[in-house]
Amino acid sequence: MKAYGKKTWLIPDTFLSSVSGKGEQPSHEAICVINTSSRDAHIKMTLLFEQKDFLEGFNAECPSMRTNHIRMDKIKSKDGSMIPRDTPYALIIESDTPIVVQYSRLDTSSTNMALMTTIAYPVDDNSKL
């Protein structure tokens, strides 16, 4: 199967809310990845903030010919840190094999839940500045 996608993706508007409605589904974000290549994808995520230094060490995998829905409220960095809630951030997602990335946010803070989803921005891996 052909390896569709790119190795670098950007998501400029992410936000992990601490407010959740009553019920079984907490407010959360997910980075949805599809890997159509014949190799497992090793994924590195870097978080960028407006008012503080970036965070690294968030990693995930997506097996060959599979999908992975990476819940941002559950992922931990190498040092055990979690993504800060109620703080806007952006994501740089890098993979060692081409992948396709989609971002989704579920807001359950009110009785009328809201779901937002968008394809991430694919970076041309061959571009030169």
Image: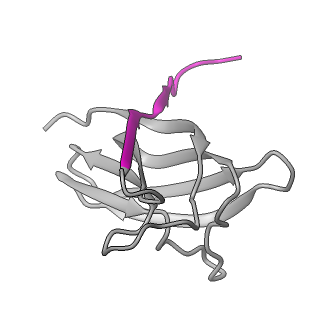
**Residue at screen point 20% across, 49% down:** 38
Horizontal relation, residue 47 to residue 59: left or right: right
Instruction: Judge whether residue 40 can be spotted in this image.
Output: no
Q: Is residue 128 magenta?
A: yes
Q: Where residue 127 appears, x then y in whole percent? A: 58, 19
- In percent of width and height, residue 8 lies at 51, 38
Identify the magenta region.
114-129
> Is residue 98 one of those drawn in magenta?
no
Residue most toward the front?
111
Q: Is residue 14 visible?
A: yes
Q: Residue 39 in the image: x percent, y percent?
A: 27, 53
The quadrant of the image that shows the N terminus is: top left
| Quarter assignment of residue 90 | top right
Q: Residue furthest bottom?
A: 80
Residue at horizontal 51%, vertical 28%? 125
Check the picture and name the quadrant holding the C terminus: top right
Residue 119 drawn above or below residue 43: above
Q: Nearer the viewer, residue 87 or 121?
A: 87
Q: Residue at x 53, y 57 (%)?
A: 44
